[in-house]
Amino acid sequence: MPFRKLAPRISNIVHYSQHEVMARRNDHSREELIEMTLNCVEAYLKDNPYHSLSLRKVAAMIGYVPSTLVNVFGSYNILLLHVVARTLDDLRRQAQEKLQSSTDPKTSLFLLAQVYLDFAKANPYRWQLVFEHSMKGNDMPDWHSDRIQNMTGILETLLHKLSPLRSDESVVEASRVLWAGVHGITLLSVDDKFFTDVPVNGQELINNLLTGYLSSWVAA
């Protein structure tokens, strides 16, 4: 069932081509409206933080009333969660493409960390939303939990290959140690908060972390 829409306010339209603006003159199906909304938010996040967004602002940018978006997504928070999900999908896709170039688990771990840092630098506001979004006490939908498990699963699989005799518990612990370390360095790198008078290369710090931790973990 198509949704009726408001006439768009040109001053509120961002990151849309002439073709897309003209397309908004017609009603859209639920699927089309979802795609259009998520594309709009992602385009906004290329240059702006999610804090400056609101349900009303998103609705205005695509020419619909806020209640329509609530009917489609359930809430503004779930709308943002869909954006987070697509960001994780993009990150996972890039990671899988990068890992195709290596069959060595240790090399693959370094490549995976590189993808993580590069993605965050290239998409700082989308990446920020991933880690600052909150379910506000509500249960996380299964479709999103599955995405998180898929991402952590890549890391755990590589660690299993690197040290096959390690227990599942040891692998999970190691994966979280590495993720926490890489994430922390990435966060400081993206925000430029190393607080040092000399240049600091985030990738070099990550490589140092992986080299030291993996050597001791495999040898233990």
Image: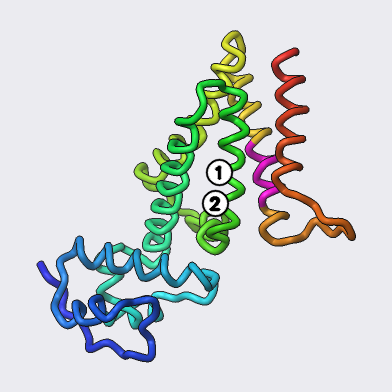
Query: How far across and down, in percent of the image, does residue 142 sit?
Result: 36, 42
Magenta segment range? Answer: 179-186
Query: How far across and down, in percent of the image, does residue 5 sit?
Result: 20, 81
Query: How far across and down, in percent of the image, does residue 14 sit?
Result: 39, 80
Q: Is residue 176 toward the left or the right of residue 85 in the image?
A: right
SS assignment at label 2: helix
Front-most of 76 and 99? Answer: 99
Query: How far across and down, in percent of the image, does residue 167 sit?
Result: 59, 13
Q: Which residue corresponds to the image point at 59% horizontal and 26% vertical from the top-left?
A: 172
The residue most toward the top is 165
Residue linked to disc 1: 115
SS assignment at label 1: helix
Q: Residues within 10 Å of mark 1 (few under 14, many from 20)?
A: many
User: Residue 82's image quarter?
Assistant: bottom left
- Looking at the rendering, in which quadrant would you find the C terminus? top right
Task: Examine the residues drawn in magenta and state their main secondary structure.
Answer: helix
Q: Residues within 10 Å of mark 2 (few under 14, many from 20)?
A: some
Residue linked to disc 2: 119
Membership of 181 in magenta stretch: yes
Is residue 133 visible in the rendered image? The answer is no
Determine contact: label 1, label 2, CB under 8 Å.
yes
Q: Which residue corresponds to the image point at 48% horizontal and 39% vertical from the top-left?
A: 95
User: Residue 115's image quarter?
Assistant: top right
> Colour scheme used in the picture?
rainbow
Q: Which residue corresponds to the image point at 43% horizontal and 38% vertical from the top-left?
A: 97
